Image (tube, grey):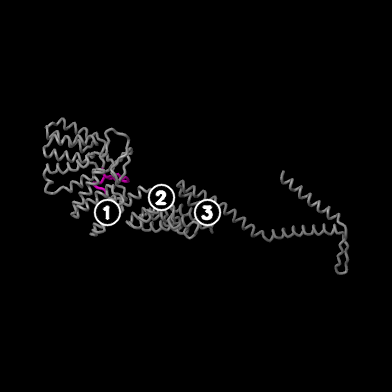
Amino acid sequence: MLKTFLFLVKAALVIGVLIWLAEQEGNVQIDWMEYTVNVHVGLFLAGLFTLILVSIFIYRVLKTVVDFPASYRYYSQIRAKNKGYRALTQGLTAVAAGDAKAAVKYAEKARSLMPEDKGLPLLLEAQAARLDGREGDAQESFAGLIENKDTSFLGVRGLLQSSMDVGDDRGALALARQALKLHPKQPWILRTVYDLEIALREWSAAEATLKRAVKASAITKERALNDRVAMDLAIALSAESEGLQDVAASQYRAALKLNDRSIPAIVLAAEYYIRQGQTKRAKILIEKAWKRSPHAAMVDVWDQLMPKRNSSDALDRLKWYEKLVKLNGDNARAQVAAGQAACDAALWGEARKYFMAAEAIRPSKELYKALAVLEDRANNDREAARAWLEKAADVAGERVWICRESGRVYPNWSPIAAPHGSFNTIEWNYHIGEDGDDGEAVLLTASVVDPMDDTLIEAPNDNAKTA
């Protein structure tokens, strides 16, 4: 309807112009060679107008004929490109579906239809080759993507994945840093660079990347603080093993300065002071931390701090653990240790008092086994001892140092979880298993534990108190 209206308007304009020309008065005289022509001005202008239109029409016809080969080539290219894009779509769909045969087929078709395109067809070729098990061809295609500034990131990411798949952390780190230059605030790239620097023990570089990652919200501030403490402790342990005691001492202090409530930092620093003969300094550190937030791991350090001349005497051991309990008695492990020392000294009433205090804080297998020993020694009551052992079997589990990635249990915290080498994944959490198991563990998913603290956040439990 609109086209018809526009055509009528144009026709009316042309007719109007012709009528106007015809109505014009005057003649036009043309002298050419021996000829003289007198023409009415209206007729002359109408003829001139018609001549112009015919000339334009002839020009367009001739131009179309002359340009036909180029136009046909352009049309063919557009048609091939459209087919190529369709092949790309089908190929990428095949890659997503895991159909290697179809992916390779469409990759070859896209390449034949779009031979000059160094972007998406190369990406499809790389993905199809990887899916088909031809990693070398895939890497060659990814390398080709790097040459195109518009697709260079895709090439870097593909090669990065290849390096990580084969365990080439050094090569992967170089590629990840290249990707980071292209996208300096991309969270996943920052995390990848950080994880690779940690894996290669490039602590200084990792700390700098960690700061960037926190600013980009790629890593939380809480995790960053824990990781920085773990890094300082890792450097300290490495320096100590190499005999660099000044460096080790400085790093232990740095870890405590970052987080003076970090249980790993407190325990490892105290053990370092003990190895260096600075027992007084270690004792002050443990006492200060124990008053504020007692932790079961500190009990082992407290045991190491016991004067050697008193360690074999049960009464002296009892007095030593009583000092810890008096500083802060809200820890089941310390109460059990004091009760066991009292039991060894044949102070049955004292032993039972400490054991009952431990049960009020947090029941454990260790506690109930100790009570079984007490019943057997004090009263020779095998039935009562058996009852305590049955209760020990019903206790859900013990809190231990456990890797949240592998579930492996460790006797002590370490910044690196052997043998798989994960960083800062050992945390204080529950272990469920029978005595004599292979050390594997299951985490209680109902509980959430801060690996740097002994505070447990869990569903309400009348018997649950600070460990």
Relative to 349, is 444 on the left or the right?
Answer: right
Asked which quadrant contains residue 173, the reply is: bottom left
Relative to 121, is 242 on the left or the right?
Answer: left
Q: Residues under labels 3 and 2: Cα distance?
A: 37 Å
**Mark 1 residue type:** Arg
Q: Is residue 438 visible?
A: no
Write down the region rendered in magenta. 400-413
Disc marking residue 253? 1
**Mark 3 residue type:** Ala
Asked which quadrant contains residue 2, the reply is: top right
Tag nearer the camera, 1 or 3: 1
Residue designated by label 2: 218
Q: Residues under labels 2 and 1: Cα distance?
A: 28 Å
Residue 287 colored in magenta in the image: no
Relative to 460, is 46 on the left or the right?
Answer: right
Residue 402 colored in magenta in the image: yes
Q: From the top left corner, tell me how far across and down residue 106 is, in percent.
A: 51, 51
Q: Residues under labels 1 and 3: Cα distance?
A: 61 Å
**Mark 2 residue type:** Ala
Element marked by disc 2: loop
Quarter of the picture holding the N terminus = top right
Q: From the top left corner, tell me how far across and down residue 329 is, in percent.
A: 22, 39
Residue designated by label 3: 110
Element marked by disc 3: helix
Element marked by disc 1: helix
Tag nearer the camera, 3 or 2: 2
